[in-house]
Amino acid sequence: MKNISFLFFLVLFSFPSAASDLRAYLDSKQFYAPGQGNYIEFHIEFIGPSLKYIGKDGGLIGEVAIKMSILKNGESVQTDAYRLSSPFMKDSIISDFYDIKRFALDPGEYQFNIELLDLNNDQEPLKATQNILIEDLSSSISISDIVIAEFASKGDGSSVFYKSGYDIIPRLVTFYPKELTIIPAYFEIYNSNKLEDSIFAIKQTITNALTSEILQDFTEFTKLNTAEVVPYFKKIDISNVTSGKYILSFTIINKNMIQLSSQSYDFDRSNDIDYSYLAEELVLDPAFQESITDDSIGFYLESLIPISKANEIRNIVKLSKLRNAANARKYIQLYWANTAPQNTYEAWIKYKHQVQRVQRSYSNTFQNGYETDRGRVYLQYGPPTHINRNENSSTELPYEIWQYNRIGVYNNRRFVFYNPELTNNNYKLLHSDMVGEIQNTNWQAELSRRNGQNNDQFGGSSQEMYNE
């Protein structure tokens, strides 16, 4: 099944209009109910502090107006408009709150529109639009979209968040810091009763999204009895998953170990373990000493930041402040010994050349090349397969669209950079469909804000260039 949710995720939160204070996360999940058909859920998490509240009974209450519409071929097929009150906030402690809306839809392509308005604020409403694809889950052996729980508890069916015995408040943030060690995943398996055997299995895997390496300790098989609908709820312990980008996958396996259908969930993990590269017994490789001049040690030390994990970045910043050239040299050598133990020096020299190229191409008056968005993306993901540039449009800000045929396990990923200041080679990342990167479905409108004007009709050629 095609996952339709991720591209819409975070749009409302990360890129509210300039006139609005309201912020929210939005995600969508597709399911099937026998006798009722295919349906889609829209999950909303309102960022509590972004609303304006009014006093009531010694506490605070917020209120939001919500409008949703679903169109097919330009014609409205589903609409809903309602008011949602926040939970009663006591002692001025403002928390996020949630809502969920379900729409039964036949298989096909649709356009979903949503508008959110803080009723206690005189700002403009927050709007977003997204194309959605509803697939037919009624006959094939398949898996619904995966819902990750922020909170899960036994339910009696009275809550709008109820599913198969549980009240599941969805988690819409895909980032897991060290403090969060569990991913509670819920999904449904459809039509397994069409298998010849009465038992099937679900295979669970976690894959490093950038290296395609499967984490063997997290590969598990669970046997289940066949049925028209099989609900599945599993808590995955990620305590030992190190920092990085990962894909949690579930696959239906029959008795012959043939994979029938799968579904996945992308997440970012930060699980920093404090350690030091600065081993006293390290003997510096003369080749490394000769490859870094005394006046460039700090530059090449900090150039490792774009490809480093959070704890490594802290080490780099600490070393940079100490200005200890010997320890900085040790760090660079040990970093590459850990990263590329089989060809340490060669890997370092290759990266050094990339840093130099980034410096020539993307540095500006205020930033080294590796500190810029384009430089960071180049060093983190490698050179793009293709670049489309438009620097002389009369209706759009200067921009570049980088296209990668492949990044790790991901195919056909794009990055949109633009220069809002029109000077100084200062291009910033505006939008990308890569996991973990900034996403903005209104990026065309941002490009059209040249000279302070917002051209809602997007007069330029950016969409065509994006789709090339």
Image (cartoon, rainbow, N blue to C red):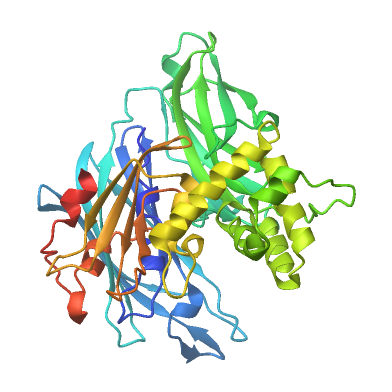
Residue 170 in the image: state x and y as whole percent.
50, 54
Residue 61 in the image: state x and y as whole percent.
47, 83
Question: Which quadrant does the C terminus fall into?
Answer: top left
* 56 over 214 or under it: above or below: below
Q: Nearer the viewer, residue 427 or 164?
A: 427
On the question of residue 180 being in view, the answer is: yes
* 456 over 451 or under it: above or below: above
**Residue for point 60% across, 63% down:** 299
Compared across the picture, whether 22 is left or right of 264 comes to left
Residue 159 in the image: state x and y as whole percent.
48, 56
On the question of residue 161 being in view, the answer is: no
Residue 203 in the image: state x and y as whole percent.
57, 25
Q: Residue furthest right?
A: 281
Compared across the picture, whether 221 is left or right of 262 comes to right
Q: Nearer the viewer, residue 376 or 121?
A: 376
* 386 over 17 or under it: above or below: above
Q: Nearer the viewer, residue 16 or 172?
A: 16
**Residue for point 49% across, 89% down:** 56
Instruction: Examine the image and state in which quarter residue 85 appears.
Output: bottom left
**Count of numbered circles on the image:** 0
* 212 over 303 or under it: above or below: above
Question: Which quadrant does the N terminus fall into?
Answer: top left
